[in-house]
Amino acid sequence: MARQVDVVIIGAGSAGLSAMSEVRKKTDNFILVNQGPYGTSCARVACMPTKALIEAARACHGRHFLKHLGVQGTESLTIDRPRILAHVRRLRDGFTSGMINSTAKLGDKLITGPARFIDPGTIEVAGRVYKTAKTVIATGSRSIVPSAWHRLGNRVITTEEIFELTDLPDTLAVIGLGPAGLEMAQALARLGVKVTGVEQGAMVGGLSDPEVAAGMVDILRAEMAVHTGMTADLEPAGSELEVGLGKEKIRVAKVLATMGRRPNLEDMGLENLGLDGEAGGLLPHDPATMQLGALPVFIAGDANGDRPLLHEAIDEGRIAGFNAVSDQLARFRRRTPLAITFVEPNIVTVGQRYEEISNLDDCVIGGHDFSIQARARMSNSNQGLIRLYARRSDGLVLGAEMAIPAAEHVGHLLALAIQQKTTINELLRLPFYHPVIEEGIQAALRGLSTQTDQGKVSDTELLLCGSHVDDCLS
Ligand SMILES: Cc1cc2nc3c(=O)[nH]c(=O)nc-3n(C[C@H](O)[C@H](O)[C@H](O)COP(=O)(O)OP(=O)(O)OC[C@H]3O[C@@H](n4cnc5c(N)ncnc54)[C@H](O)[C@@H]3O)c2cc1C
């Protein structure tokens, strides 16, 4: 006998759990199906352990600045890498335990096993059949490892495995320098691993602006070998690996494969949904409703391959869950895009990216070089570049790409400005304290304002009150 439920949520990750929080506001008759470890990918193997490792690596890297300042004895500092990994796992276990506890209380609403569609309203899990009015697919994604590398065994690892190591190898190649690869590469280099980074394109860390990316690659080369525009061939070499990079060959103990992620959609019976999307490819979904085609099925988080970031997965889960228990589909406004890569200097893209605006006639670009930025010089972090994009006709701020100190905070400020549809001159009316990193943004805005159709507006003109006396009161 099939069990009849209102909603099946497939995947107990961040998107699935946020879908569940919406669903249970309207019905108790749902099930959450999960295959694989509980605790969410973010807390277990992604956002949280990577940032814990990065913070440890950053602290270790600080010894170079101390030496520069004249602090004695930094050369004799040693890094206990097994202890650092244990510290990361301890923090990670704290983060996952909250999630695990919340699913553990679900009783017979929690089903463990792979879910498979028999048709859009029928799902089979571990030999049992469920009839459902609506379904949310939130099965996440996993690292791509070329099948030819499977024969290399545990010499090729991914971010799913690296935090389980009890020690780090002395040599390692990171293949793929997108956000995850770049974060890991710099952190491991700072922990004393001899890192070689390989990227087939010219862009790193999620950037699309060639000037920012080229500057970032130069900065990275001070800490590790970086090969861009290269594909890596791997061959076994005793207990190690030989990495072929064109004519050059290097030997490493391990390879970390960070070549992108693939939605977990295989073997789910998606062919029984009657959709046009290719098997294993991206499925046709509406980002404002999360609906899959015209089906009573929603797809949220990394599973839809659209915006593979934690805050987006949570939003998408909420949208999917809300619509799964509503009579009418609601359309939702999405937030201004914001992506951060936690390297030093931080990489941020916010609003429209360079690749989206570079062909627009009505667009101006302005930048600021942080190698000369006063506050950054004091903290020895004076490197990198910000490029801001605005509309020529009215100075509306469209987006930015940057690799600059404290960009994780600057990026949030700019996201706020972009989402509020702010112009360059409105931003220049705001206070900029001294001496702060944000003065670099002020300089970029000033440069950008001269290129707009309004031309440069002086601070005096910007601060001039309107004719009404209330305009001057704040
Ligand atoms: C190394 C790394 C670092 C990252 N750092 C950041 C960061 O700093 N900030 C940020 O915003 N984002 C970051 N991300 C991205 C972020 O982690 C993901 O976008 C987010 O975790 C996706 O959540 P999700 O719910 O879609 O997937 P998940 O949390 O993976 O949940 C999917 C669940 O579905 C289960 N499942 C899979 N297949 C099936 C099936 N057939 N049946 C039943 N259950 C199934 C899985 O086992 C899992 O429990 C990072 C990603 C990586 C890889």
Image: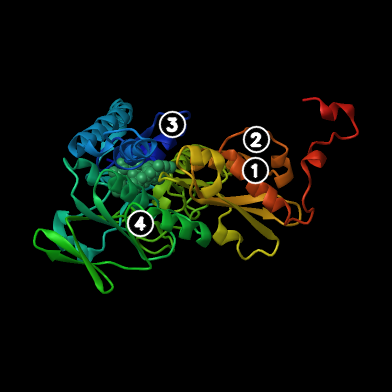
The reply to whether dot 1 and dot 3 touch (C-beta < 8 Å) is no
Q: Earlier in the sequence, mark 2 or mark 4?
A: 4
Q: What residue type is disc 3 on?
A: Ser
Please state if 471 lies on the left or on the right of 230 as rendered.
right
Residue with the most extreme left position: 238
Q: Secondary structure at mark 1?
A: helix
Q: Which residue is mark 4?
A: 260
Label 2: state its secondary structure: loop
The image quadrant of residue 88 is: top left
**Is 410 located above or below residue 269 in the figure?**
above
The label on residue 21 is 3
Q: Are marks 2 and 1 in contact (CB under 8 Å)?
A: yes
* Front position in the image: 45 or 240: 240
Identify the residue position indicated by label 2 in the image.
432
Q: What is the three-letter code of the residue carrying label 4?
A: Gly
Which element type, helix, strand or loop, lies under badge 4?
loop
Determine which residue is flagged by label 1: 442
Do the residues bearing badges 2 and 4 touch, measured as CB atoms within 8 Å? Answer: no
Q: Nearer the viewer, mark 1 or mark 3?
A: 1
Q: Give me the C-alpha separation between circle 2 and circle 4.
A: 39 Å
Q: In this rendering, would 154 be left or right of 3?
A: left
